[in-house]
Amino acid sequence: MIDREKLEHAFKEIIEALGDDPNREGLIDTPKRATEMYLEQFEGMNYTNDELVMMFDKTFDGDYLTDSKNLVVVKDIDIFSHCEHHLALMYDMKVDIAYIPNGRVIGLSKLARIADMAAKRLQLQERIGNDILEIVKKITNSNDILVRIEGCHSCVTARGVKKRSKTMTLAKIGNLDLEVLR
């Protein structure tokens, strides 16, 4: 669990380390506000993948969808995350999830919630995709899942090389390929 008190104290120390006065008018409540923001942005750190499976395990009978001609695709799920190497923002991220039902169909909004919670951790883009895939597999029991993520990383755009770019990662099991996302 995230330690609210420790986090608020750390933000006050960061302000001091930057050479500013955490007691000046514009900064008095900043540690508290920043803590609230971090509690929201890192909510996923409070849960393991198995706990997320339990939270979002809302499926419907999909026996009529068990042949490989049936495909579920949810595209362009907006997420953001924070790079574990620099604590930098990963932004403008879009997640596409495709799977072939294997007797169980997950509620579509649950796919967006899973993507959101997997991203709300100190992460690597590659791990976000793998976490989503693992959670979706455990819920749907599908053997054919594809998770594509594309996004920008401020550790590339705002520091170091300072070049705008997009990173695309793909996590998959089974026989689905990128064509299903077109």
Image: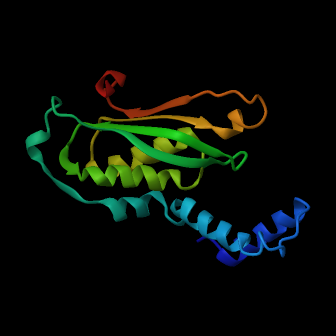
Image quadrant where one finds the N terminus: bottom right
Instruction: Decide if residue 143 is on the left or right side of residue 36.
Output: left
Residue pictured at 45% horizontal, 52% vertical: 116
Residue pictured at 69% horizontal, 33% vertical: 157
Residue 102 versus residue 35: which sits nearer the camera?
35
Residue 143 versus residue 56: which sits nearer the camera?
56
Residue 29 versus residue 95: which sits nearer the camera?
29
Residue 60 point in image, percent of width and height: 16, 55
Instruction: Decide if residue 36 is on the left or right side of residue 75.
Output: right
Image quadrant where one finds the C terminus: top left
Residue pictured at 27% horizontal, 47% vertical: 141
Residue 142 point in image, percent of width and height: 27, 42
Is residue 23 depicted above or below 71 in this figure? below
**Residue 20, quarter of the rendered image:** bottom right
Is residue 145 depicted above or below 182 in this figure? below
Residue 79 point in image, percent of width and height: 48, 47
In the image as oriented, which residue stretches furthest toward the top?
179
In the image as oriented, which residue stretches furthest toward the right?
19
Residue 111 versus residue 61: which sits nearer the camera?
111
